[in-house]
Amino acid sequence: MEYLLVISVLVSFLLTVLLLPKWIKTCRKIGLVWEDMNKFGHPKNVAASGGIVVIMAFVFGVLTYVALKTFVFGGTVRALEIFALLSVILILGIVGLTDDLLGWRNKGLSVRIRLLLATTASIPLVVINAGTHLMVLPFIGSVNFGILYPLILIPLGIVGAGTTYNFLAGFNGLESGQGILILSFLSFVAYVTGSPWLAAVGLCMVASLIGFYYFNKVPAKVFPGDIVTYSIGALIAGMAILGNFEKIAFVVFIPYIFEVVLKLRGGLEKHSFGVPDKNGNLSLPYDKRIYGLTHLAIKILNKFGKATERKVTYLIHAFQILFILIAFVML
């Protein structure tokens, strides 16, 4: 009967697929559309903040899982941890939506406010003393962080992952595709390490993102917005904390660490977009200097042919898969 739990994943997928067309239609009707920056002429015709649908579908999927475990199977469910994690994601989702409404051209929320709100979002996991205080560090071995784990490391994890996942963005299908890859693997890790409930939560988000990807891939009909990127980052950190596989999650997140380093070269002010021509080919925007992995991908692809938005996205996905394979070997 446990196979019935897949219903929760299907709920997330179906809600996304059914509701997104209505969201796209409404956005176009009221003019809530954003520019597609990697298309020639930057057409302003893509529905904004479709991540609202993704997060809603994800939450309903998780609640379906809790309901099935409670009323059908009559077993125990990690309700405290699940609702704490949902609280983190919803708080950061609101922060991301606020950032979307202010607009990236206006630089959205200030860095200071963003970090403060992201720190606040970590409180639900802090107050339940989530995770295990004992961690195995490279070259050091086992370290018991004690009270420092909930008070320092949990906020750092949520803030770090939640606010930097959106650095590697701006291309059709990139954010949602990366989320599918990373969260699918982390759900697998959660399952094989004895946390099937956490795997179910992760797969609900994966299902929502798969439904969203169909509308977000090149040529995109809808953009995710920061509401999705902040939430995905928070879920990655939350799963690592609750599943006690921080080291694995860190390895998987290495491409984003590279992205942060490259963005810092530009003072966090350089955008990830390329410069499109009439044929859809992309060139570097900043005098051939590299300020992100998307710029690096454009440079590599142009050396061996032509860089297009789809090729850039796929090359970054391949780079991400490389680190997923490294993390898999470490299991």
Image (tube, grey):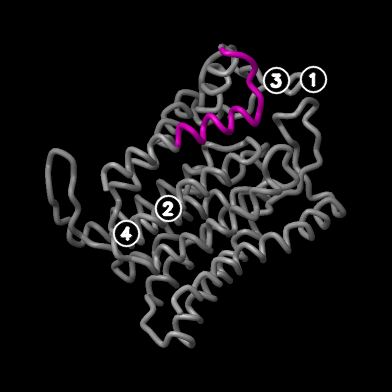
The nearer-to-camera label among 2 and 4 is: 4
In screen coordinates, is 146 left or right of 111? left
In screen coordinates, is 130 left or right of 307? left
In screen coordinates, is 30 left or right of 81? right
The nearer-to-camera label among 1 and 4 is: 4
Asked if residue 142 lies in the magenta stretch, the reply is no
3 and 2 marks in contact (CB < 8 Å) = no
Mark 4 — residue?
192
* Residue 4: mark: none
Q: CA distance from mark 1 to mark 3?
A: 7 Å
| Amino acid, disc 1 | Lys
Q: CA distance from mark 2 to mark 1?
A: 38 Å
Q: Residue at x 55, y 16 (%)?
A: 299
Q: Nearer the viewer, residue 226 or 117?
A: 226
Asked if residue 316 lies in the magenta stretch, the reply is yes
For the magenta stretch, what is the residue range? Answer: 304-320
Mark 1 — residue?
278
Residue 32 picture location, percent across and down: 79, 50
First-in-chain label (3 vs 4): 4
Toward the right, the furthest residue is 29
| Amino acid, disc 2 | Ile
